[in-house]
Amino acid sequence: TMAHSKALLVLENFIAGKFVPCSSYIDSYNPSTGEVYCRVPDSGKEEMEAAVKAAKAAFPVWSSKSPLERSQILNKLADLIEHDLEAFAQAESKDQGKTITFARTVDIPRAVYNFRFFASSILHHTTECTEMATMGCMHYTSRAPVGVAGLISPWNLPLYLLTWKIAPAIACGNTVVAKPSEMTSVTAWMMCKLLEKAGVPHGVVNVVFGTGTKVGEALVCHPDVPLISFTGSTLTAQQITEKSAPHCKRLSLELGGKNPAIIFDDADLTQCIPTTLRSSFANQGEICLCTSRIFVQRGIYSEFLKRFVAEAKKWKVGNPSDPTVDMGALISKEHLEKVRSYVKKAQGEGARVLCGEGVDSLALPTGNQKGYFMLPTVIAEVKDESCCMQEEIFGPVTCVVAFDTEEEVIERANSVKYGLAATVWSSNVGRVHRVAQRLQSGLVWTNCWLVRDLNLPFGGVKASGIGREGAKDSYEFFTEVKTITIKH
Ligand code: NAD
């Protein structure tokens, strides 16, 4: 009906500094009610062509600005997003299903910080110089932006992960075409409204909305986009690698995980239990860094399990806009079904579901009955070979298993295809160093989780990705280096 369609939020692509409508649209759902509330452009090749053209045209001027000029613009943009923090947080929570508390304290503050961080770090890079005195030569390196950067981001931390790419790309002097997830496009669209006021010249940041297979692929295959920074699933990364191969594109791939927590019997459980609950269930378990395999040393296994399950049962699941709620809705109906199917499979294999899905009942407020909710779920007595211990579930499901020795647990922790993040809990400093060194993982947190210094590399090994992001790493990825030799 007209009344219904009037109420819908309709997004537009942002190309060459202007909002432009699209000829067709995709429905976007509010995960906490199950209702369509927004229409997202279903862009294709034509829209991508226009966006790349705009980015290419903006490159000569933007790339020749000084780092300080670009830095000031990034800081201004950070200020503008921060000024609207509450509106951004509300929008992110509604669009993604995450709690308003998480959006307020994690997603949007980090998006602001991404711009501030790269506004600062871009001012402090140095290049290398070597001398060959006997040859009368010195060599030095110089770095220049690459051109039009293609940026593709997922739905779990929408603005957070998109700005983690936009900020370093434009700080380095590139222009960008960004493609957010079709399921969470709203905050990217809101950010576009602030670009002009921040002083970002037209065409420097272009955002084209739509699906991965249509407009995402158009970006990956575009001959004038020499570089793709992608965060998402391992399967999509394989497709991107294949499609971009004929063009020899530079790729950064931040992918999935099957992250272990290793808890030794000398761990401080008063710290370990609340942190491991967060690392398992924060953002509905929809963070690439979430723990989904918990290895507990035999001596404390039953005590850990008892306390962990008791605390998991206390998590309040419901309306994401209620600030007392700990866990919101999953991203989509399909994803909820997929996550649930893992719990069923585990039960079929003889594992025990100690709390959550299929065990406890979930009481939802009337307005949220059709939302995509599930309870924090803990599975025990599951075999290492089980799909629940091997595949990324990407929901509020975690498996707890016992181990005996350090040697054994390292081998078991490493026996998955992924290698993104691990946590190690022990009060023995020698042990945490030994174990951290031997884990096949891009990140290891000991006695903590998700404490990040953006200066240092972020990224995974094995099926969790290729390349790293961070102050120096993103600078290197988003610039091309040249070695120049001077003979006197
Ligand atoms: P996804 O791979 O389905 O989609 C990610 C993005 O790629 C979306 O914008 C999508 O539209 C696009 N896309 C899909 N197919 C494409 C194609 N053929 N060509 C070009 N683009 C395409 O991932 P998702 O479901 O949105 O996100 C969840 C995944 O992301 C999980 O595996 C999670 O672990 C991973 N993730 C990784 C990190 C990290 O930093 N390592 C961070 C967050 C999420």
Image (cartoon, rainbow, N blue to C red):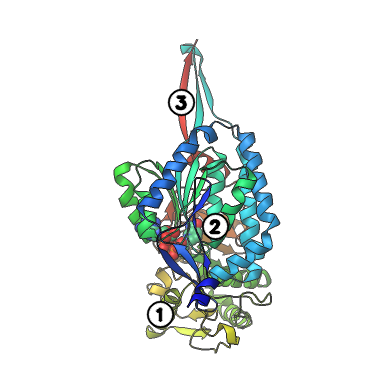
Toward the viewer: 371 or 39? Answer: 39
Residue that carries the numbered disc 3 in the rendered image: 483
* Residue 255 in the image, given as x and y percentages of width and height: 44, 58
Question: Judging from the image, what secondary structure is the residue with disc 3 in?
Answer: strand
Looking at marks 3 and 1 on the same chain, the residue that comes earlier in the sequence is marked by 1
Residue that carries the numbered disc 2 in the rendered image: 189
Q: Is residue 85 above or below residue 311?
A: above
Which numbered disc, 1 or 2, marks the residue closer to the eye?
2
Looking at marks 1 and 2 on the same chain, the residue that comes earlier in the sequence is marked by 2
Q: Is residue 298 visible?
A: yes
Q: Is mark 2 within 8 Å of ligand 1?
A: no
Name the quadrant containing residue 44. Answer: bottom left
Residue at mark 1 to residue at mark 2: CA–CA distance:
34 Å
* Residue 8 in the image, given as x and y percentages of width and height: 53, 70
Toward the viewer: 41 or 485? Answer: 41
* Residue 135 in the image, given as x and y percentages of width and height: 46, 12
Residue at mark 3 to residue at mark 1: CA–CA distance:
54 Å
Q: Is residue 280 visible?
A: no
Q: Decide if residue 58 is on the left or right side of residue 233.
A: right
Question: Judging from the image, what secondary structure is the residue with disc 2 in?
Answer: helix
Residue at mark 3 to residue at mark 2: CA–CA distance:
40 Å
Q: Give the crowd class for mark 2: few <14, some 14-19, many >=20 residues within 10 Å.
A: many
Toward the viewer: 36 or 461? Answer: 36
Residue that carries the numbered disc 1 in the rendered image: 341
* Residue 67 in the image, given as x and y percentages of width and height: 61, 34
Question: Judging from the image, what secondary structure is the residue with disc 1 in?
Answer: helix
Q: What kind of residue is marked 3?
A: Thr
Q: Give the crowd class for mark 3: few <14, some 14-19, many >=20 residues within 10 Å.
A: few
Q: What kind of residue is marked 2?
A: Trp
The image quadrant in which ligand 1 is located:
bottom left
Which numbered disc, 3 or 2, marks the residue closer to the eye?
2
Q: Decide if residue 230 is on the left or right side of residue 279.
A: left
